[in-house]
Image (spheres, helix red, strand yellow):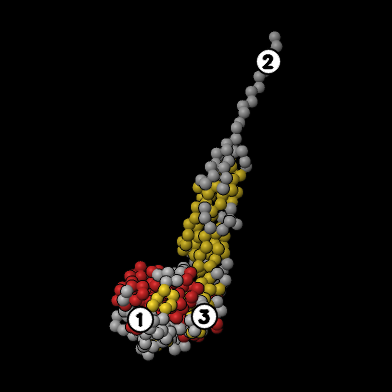
């Protein structure tokens, strides 16, 4: 039995972007767009995505952090911390991710690991764990420095992992909040201007240019977008998201609606239902051609045991094998009991 599932016209013309390096990655890890994605680049304050993840994995949100003089007066964007103040880890993470406080980055790093070098070691260890093969971190804030770089692909991997952390996702989605007497407004304009944007981090230095990492979800499909050295980064992200959501989708390929009644010979029931052992969904181009081929016997003999193999479903994507799923019997059918009938002829003398 063969089933063909929806074919539409192909339209794979991705939009142009201002970014020197870019990546759009589905939350499952599938890449739908890339441009110079493995070129090592400066990443400015998008570094703080890694800083936040490492902190969240080592600290409780309600831990108190005393602000020391060496945490204050950092170059660049700041939360304007003052010596002697006390903040929770969560408040400093808000200052880190919303207003890109370099002082917050230093305070969190020293609180977490004791000093900057030890914290950087944690950052690089986490990068290794995530498979960020072309990244090296030298500080927790992202100011230009020797040995501090990443790639669009690696930053997409990082953001996908971060968005699985509930606390990170909640904080990065916060549009504004109050910390002490300060009102913090998230620098990520996409939260208000891009449909479905649920988080991200901006970055800029004169050498790195404009850097932006964001995450957007629409109708259950989630993407991460990374642009590095992108003069028109806000519009780059909007265009790439609109293109990705219109050209790719999560599709249910095999579900509970698929089943086959197979005749049973010598059983207590005339048929038994064969169903897929598991459901299967896939992230695919909207115009992908899928073919389902069900292979099974035309009939079976009793007894039939529930869960036994009845055949298989082969899923082809554009003619190539995508998935193979076992068909199993949904119920059992005992063998019928047959009685022997004997006719006796009496001869009368």
Mark 3–mark 2 Cα distance, whole angstroms, equals 104 Å
Residue 8: mark: none
Secondary structure of the residue carrying numbered label 2: loop
Q: Where is residue 247 in the image (x, y as percent from the top left)?
A: 53, 74
The quarter in which the N terminus is drawn is bottom right
x 52%, y 53%: residue:
277
Circle 1 is placed at which residue position?
68
Q: Residue 79 vs residue 313: left or right?
A: left
Residue 292 in picture, x, y percent from top left: 53, 59
Q: Nearer the viewer, residue 261 or 193?
A: 193
Q: What residue do we see at 45% from left, 81% from top?
A: 95
**Furthest residue toward front:** 84
**Label 2 Cα crowd, 10 Å radius (few <14 / some 14-19 / many 20+):** few
Lower position in the chain sequence, tag 2 or tag 1: 1
Q: Furthest residue to the top?
A: 349
Q: Which of marks 2 and 1 is in front?
A: 1
Q: Looking at the picture, how far across and down is residue 41, in whole percent? A: 35, 82
| Badge number at residue 177 | 3
Closer to the observer: label 3 or label 1?
1
- Residue at 35% x, 81% y is 68
For this view, does 231 lie left or right of residue 259? left
Say whether disc 3 or disc 1 marks the residue closer to the N-terminus. 1
> How many tags in the picture?
3
Badge number at residue 346: 2
Task: Provide the secondary structure element on which disc 1 rests.
Answer: loop
Residue at 61% over, 38% down: 268
């Amino acid at each position: 039995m063969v089933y063909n599932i929806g074919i539409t016209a192909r339209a794979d013309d991705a939009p142009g972007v201002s970014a020197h390096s870019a990546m759009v990655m589905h939350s499952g890890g599938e890449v739908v767009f890339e441009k110079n994605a493995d070129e090592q680049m400066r990443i400015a304050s998008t570094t703080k995505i890694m800083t936040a993840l490492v902190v969240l994995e080592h600290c409780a949100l309600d831990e108190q952090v005393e602000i020391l003089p060496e945490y204050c007066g950092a170059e660049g964007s700041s939360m304007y911390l003052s010596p002697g103040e006390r903040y929770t880890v969560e408040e400093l993470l808000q200052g880190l991710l919303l207003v890109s406080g370099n002082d917050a980055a230093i305070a969190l790093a020293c609180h977490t690991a004791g000093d900057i070098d030890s914290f950087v070691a944690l950052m690089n260890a986490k990068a290794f764990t995530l498979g960020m093969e072309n990244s090296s971190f030298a500080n927790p804030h992202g100011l230009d420095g020797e040995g501090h770089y990443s790639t669009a692909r690696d930053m997409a991997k990082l953001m996908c992992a971060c968005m699985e952390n509930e606390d990170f996702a909640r904080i990065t989605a916060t549009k504004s909040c109050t910390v002490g007497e300060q009102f913090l407004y998230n620098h990520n304009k996409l939260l208000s201007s891009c449909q479905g944007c649920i988080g991200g981090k901006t970055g800029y230095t004169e050498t790195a240019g404009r850097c932006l990492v964001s995450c957007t979800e629409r109708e259950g499909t989630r993407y991460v977008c990374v642009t590095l050295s992108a003069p028109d980064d806000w519009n780059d992200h909007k265009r790439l998201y609109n293109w990705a959501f219109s050209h790719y989708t999560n599709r249910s390929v095999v579900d509970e609606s698929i089943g086959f009644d197979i005749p049973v010979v010598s059983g207590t029931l005339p048929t038994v239902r064969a169903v897929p052992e598991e459901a299967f969904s896939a992230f695919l181009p909207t115009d992908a051609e899928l073919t389902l081929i069900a292979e099974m016997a035309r009939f079976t003999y009793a007894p039939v045991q529930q869960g036994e193999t009845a055949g298989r479903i082969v899923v082809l994507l554009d003619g190539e094998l995508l998935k193979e799923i076992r068909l199993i019997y949904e119920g059992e059918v005992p063998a019928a009991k047959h009685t022997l009938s004997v006719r006796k002829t009496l001869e009368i003398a």
